[in-house]
Image: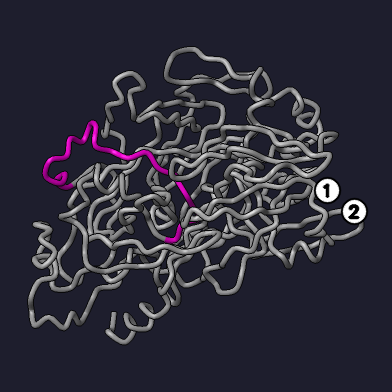
C-alpha cells in the first residue's frame, strides 16, 4: 500500500465507532402514572441495566420473566433453554414469527486471551489463527489471566478495558504512544493503541465454572492486530472489552440460545448462549435453512490491518524505549487499531433490507440497519421515527443509556406494530416490537437507520457467517427457532 493511501485512510480514522448500548439506572422519579422497575440485566463492559420506566397499566415484556419457567439445568455448567409457550402457536403458522419480543436481548459473552504474536515491521495485515499461537506476555498465566468480553459485531475495532489490559499484561509492554478516540452513545473517550499482538476468543464453555480456569484448546482468533485499550478511568467507567467485526468477518460463529452458560467471576455473573467459532470453510459447521443476507459496508473491504506511524520525528529513537515498556522495539508502531480497510474503512455488517410498520405509517426497504450482537435493544433513528410518526414527547416507555464517558441520557421507547426482514426461506417477522429512539453514527457517514439488536432473537439459535471481503462471499445471518419445550443436548451442534 502506498504512503499516500495510508495517509488518506489515516485521515478517515479520527474516531473509532464502537456502538455500546448499555442501559443504566433511572435517576429521577417515574412520571405520574408510571412505575420504575428494578432489573439486573447484563450489558457490555460489566455494566448492567438497572431500571426501566413504563406505564403501570402496560408492563414491558422482559426476557427474564419469559424464560423463568422454561429454563432448567442438567449440570452445573450448561443450562438448556426452550422457547416460552407463547411461541407454540406462532410455530404452527410461521416458525420465523415473533410475537411481542422482550425489551432486553441476550448478551454474547466470550473469553478473550492475548499473546505477543506479530509479523515484521510494516507487515500490517492480520493473520487468521485457528489455534492459539505465540508467546504469552511475561508474567501471564494463560489459565487465569484472561478477560470476559463481548462478541460485538457493532464494534469496528477490538477494544479492551483498562482492567483487562492490566490483567493480560498489555500494560505496560505492549502499549504504544498512539491514541485514538472511542465514540459511544453519549460522548467520547481517549484510548491507547497497542503494538500488534495475537487475540484469541472462545465461548464461556471454555471456562471451568468451578475453578474458573480457561481451556484454550478450542480458541480461535487472529494475530498481528492492534487493539484499543482503555486508559486508567479513575472514577469514570472503564471501557468494555468488545471483540468486533475485524474478528467475526473471518469466522462462522454459532450462537446457541438453547444452551445457556453461567460463569461467576470477580463478583460478577456472566450468562450467555453457548458460542463456538468455526473456520469459514469448515465442512463441520452447521447450516440453518432461514438466511438473512448481510452486507459488509462500506463496500470494498480487502483486509484487516492497522495504520503505522510513518514519521515519528524522533531521529530513529524508539518510542517504546521512551515509554519504558520493555516490549517490542518498533520504529513504526500502529497509529490506529486494526480495522477492515479497502476503498474506505471501519466496515460493519448491515442488514440488506428492513420493513417497519406502525399503524398506517411504514418505512420500507431500509438498508441502513446494522446487525449488532453487542446491543441488547433494537434501535430506530430519527429518520425512521419520523416516517413512523413516533412522537418523542409521548414515549410508551423510557430507558436511560450510559455512554463511554459515564454520562446518562434519557431515551424514549416505543412499540412498533411490525418489523419484517426479508430472508431466504421464511422472512423474519416480529410484532409489537419494543424499540429505542436513538441516532447512532454510521461508518458510511451520517447516522444509521437503526440497529437490529439481540432482543429480536432470544428464541433462536443463530449463525453469524462472516465474509464480504474482496473475493469472499457475502456475510449472512442464519436462524433456527428454538423448539418450544424441547431441550437439546449441550453438544448437539458440532
Please say whether residue 327 is one of the residues in the magenta stretch.
Answer: no
Left or right, 471 with respect to 70, comes to left
- Where on the picture, by quarter, is residue 389? bottom right
Q: CA distance from mark 2 to mark 1?
A: 7 Å
x, y percent for residue 130: 29, 45
Please say whether residue 137 is one of the residues in the magenta stretch.
Answer: yes
The structure residue drawn at horizontal position 39% and vertical position 50%, both measured from the top left corner, is 235
- Where on the picture, by quarter, is residue 488? top right
Q: Main secondary structure of the magenta part?
A: loop
Q: Which mark is residue 255?
A: none
Q: In the rendered structure, are the residues bearing label 2 and label 1 in contact, judged by CB atoms less than 8 Å apart?
A: yes
Establish if 344 lies above or below 439. below
Q: Which mark is residue 359?
A: 2
**Residue situated furthest front in the rendering:** 29
Q: Which residues are magenta?
A: 134-156
Q: Which mark is residue 417?
A: 1
Left or right, 467 with respect to 416, comes to left
Please identify the quadrant where the N terminus is shown.
Answer: bottom left
Front-most of residues 474 and 157? 157
x, y percent for residue 475: 52, 56
Left or right, 299 with respect to 340, comes to right
Establish if 192 lies above or below 99. below
- Where on the picture, by quarter, is residue 5? bottom left
Amino acid at each position: 500500500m502506498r504512503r499516500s493511501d495510508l495517509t488518506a485512510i489515516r485521515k478517515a480514522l479520527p474516531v473509532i465507532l464502537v456502538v455500546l448500548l448499555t442501559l443504566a439506572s433511572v435517576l429521577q422519579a417515574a412520571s405520574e402514572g408510571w412505575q420504575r422497575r428494578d432489573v439486573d440485566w447484563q450489558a457490555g463492559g460489566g455494566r448492567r441495566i438497572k431500571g426501566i420506566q413504563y406505564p403501570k397499566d402496560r408492563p414491558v415484556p422482559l426476557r427474564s420473566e419469559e424464560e423463568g419457567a422454561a429454563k432448567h439445568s442438567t449440570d452445573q455448567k450448561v443450562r438448556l433453554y426452550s422457547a416460552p409457550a407463547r411461541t407454540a402457536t406462532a410455530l404452527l403458522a410461521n416458525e420465523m414469527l415473533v410475537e411481542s419480543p422482550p425489551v432486553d436481548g441476550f448478551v454474547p459473552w466470550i473469553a478473550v486471551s492475548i499473546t505477543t504474536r506479530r509479523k515484521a515491521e510494516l507487515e500490517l495485515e492480520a493473520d487468521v489463527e485457528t489455534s492459539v499461537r505465540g508467546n504469552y506476555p511475561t508474567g501471564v498465566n494463560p489459565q487465569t489471566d484472561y478477560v470476559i468480553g463481548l462478541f460485538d459485531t457493532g464494534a469496528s475495532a477490538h477494544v479492551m478495558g483498562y482492567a483487562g489490559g492490566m490483567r493480560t499484561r498489555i500494560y505496560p509492554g505492549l502499549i504504544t504512544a498512539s491514541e485514538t478516540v472511542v465514540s459511544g452513545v453519549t460522548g467520547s473517550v481517549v484510548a491507547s493503541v497497542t503494538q500488534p499482538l495475537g487475540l484469541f476468543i472462545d465461548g464461556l464453555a471454555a471456562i471451568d465454572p468451578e475453578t474458573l480456569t480457561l481451556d484454550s484448546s478450542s480458541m480461535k482468533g487472529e494475530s498481528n492486530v492492534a487493539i484499543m485499550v482503555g486508559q486508567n478511568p479513575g472514577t469514570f467507567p472503564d471501557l468494555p472489552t468488545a471483540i468486533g467485526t475485524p474478528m467475526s468477518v473471518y469466522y462462522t460463529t454459532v450462537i446457541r440460545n438453547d444452551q445457556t452458560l453461567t460463569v461467576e467471576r470477580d463478583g460478577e455473573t456472566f450468562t450467555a448462549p453457548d458460542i463456538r467459532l468455526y473456520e469459514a470453510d469448515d465442512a463441520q459447521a452447521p447450516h440453518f435453512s432461514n438466511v438473512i443476507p448481510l452486507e459488509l459496508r462500506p463496500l470494498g473491504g480487502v483486509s484487516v490491518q492497522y495504520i503505522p506511524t510513518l514519521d515519528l520525528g524522533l531521529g530513529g529513537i524508539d518510542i517504546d524505549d521512551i515509554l519504558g515498556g520493555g516490549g517490542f522495539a518498533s520504529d513504526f508502531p500502529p497509529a490506529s487499531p486494526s480495522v477492515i480497510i479497502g476503498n474506505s474503512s471501519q466496515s460493519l455488517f448491515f442488514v440488506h433490507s428492513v420493513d417497519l410498520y406502525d399503524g398506517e405509517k411504514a418505512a420500507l426497504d431500509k438498508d441502513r440497519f446494522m446487525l449488532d450482537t453487542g446491543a441488547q435493544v433494537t434501535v430506530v433513528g430519527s429518520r425512521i421515527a419520523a416516517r413512523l410518526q413516533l412522537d418523542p414527547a409521548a414515549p410508551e416507555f423510557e430507558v436511560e443509556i450510559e455512554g463511554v464517558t459515564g454520562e446518562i441520557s434519557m431515551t424514549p421507547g416505543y412499540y412498533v406494530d411490525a418489523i419484517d426482514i426479508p430472508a431466504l426461506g421464511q422472512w423474519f417477522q416480529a410484532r409489537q416490537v419494543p424499540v429505542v429512539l436513538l441516532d447512532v453514527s454510521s461508518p458510511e457517514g451520517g447516522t444509521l437507520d437503526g440497529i437490529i439488536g439481540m432482543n429480536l432473537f432470544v428464541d433462536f439459535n443463530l449463525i453469524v457467517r462472516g465474509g464480504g471481503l474482496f473475493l469472499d462471499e457475502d456475510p449472512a445471518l442464519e436462524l433456527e427457532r428454538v423448539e418450544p419445550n424441547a431441550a437439546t443436548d449441550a453438544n448437539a451442534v458440532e
